[in-house]
Image: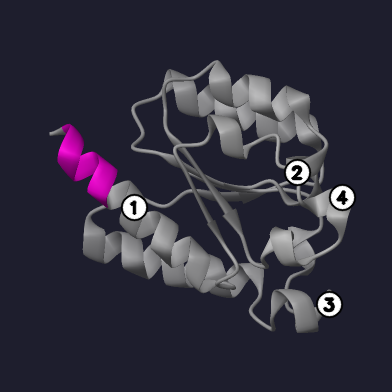
Amino acid sequence: MVLNGPNLNLLGTREPEVYGATTLDDIAQALTEQGDRLGLIVDLRQSNHEGHLIDWLHEAGATNITAVILNAGAYTHTSVALRDAIRSIAVPVIEVHLSNPAARESFRHISHISPVAAGVIQGFGARGYALALDAAAAMRQSAR
């Protein structure tokens, strides 16, 4: 499951100098193709609403999925509720950011997600999602 938070529906047009020109649809297509090669089903979702992301994390915890790839967007820096949702499920969560938050404004330096994530990938643009999917496949393989 790949979850995307607020404003990520605007990828490709929103601050392309920061987030790149790749759209969320482009990322979904590339991940679906990569998932096919890895034997993983990719379920990509996006919401601008924190509660949807929490509900989806709970859903992930109640199903037999390998991992959640989460780009929580700005909620990364503000949402204790997302942190708590991640802690409440046994499914590993891989945090992804297109940009490198540590190289940006100081309010972006704090992540409430990182301490409860299985891993963090940031600063590699859209390629970060592919790296996260590779990590999810490796987690599945090591769990066998």
Label of residue 135 in the image: 1
Q: Which residues are magenta?
A: 138-143
Q: Is residue 16 above or below residue 37?
A: below
Give the mark nearest the N terminus, 4 or 3.
Answer: 3
* Residue at left offset 75%, top offset 62%: 9
Q: Is residue 52 above or below residue 14?
A: above
Looking at the image, residue 73 sits to the left or right of residue 70; the answer is: right
- The alpha-carbon separation of the residues under discs 4 and 3 comes to 18 Å
Badge 2: few (under 14), some or many (20 or more) residues near its Cα, within 10 Å?
few
State yes or no: discs 4 and 2 in contact (Cβ < 8 Å).
yes
- The alpha-carbon separation of the residues under discs 3 and 2 comes to 21 Å
The residue singled out by tag 3 in the image is: 15
Nearer the viewer's eye, disc 4 or disc 3?
4
* Residue at left offset 55%, top offset 15%: 88
The image quadrant of residue 24 is: bottom right
- The alpha-carbon separation of the residues under discs 2 and 1 comes to 23 Å
Residue ranking furthest to the top: 88
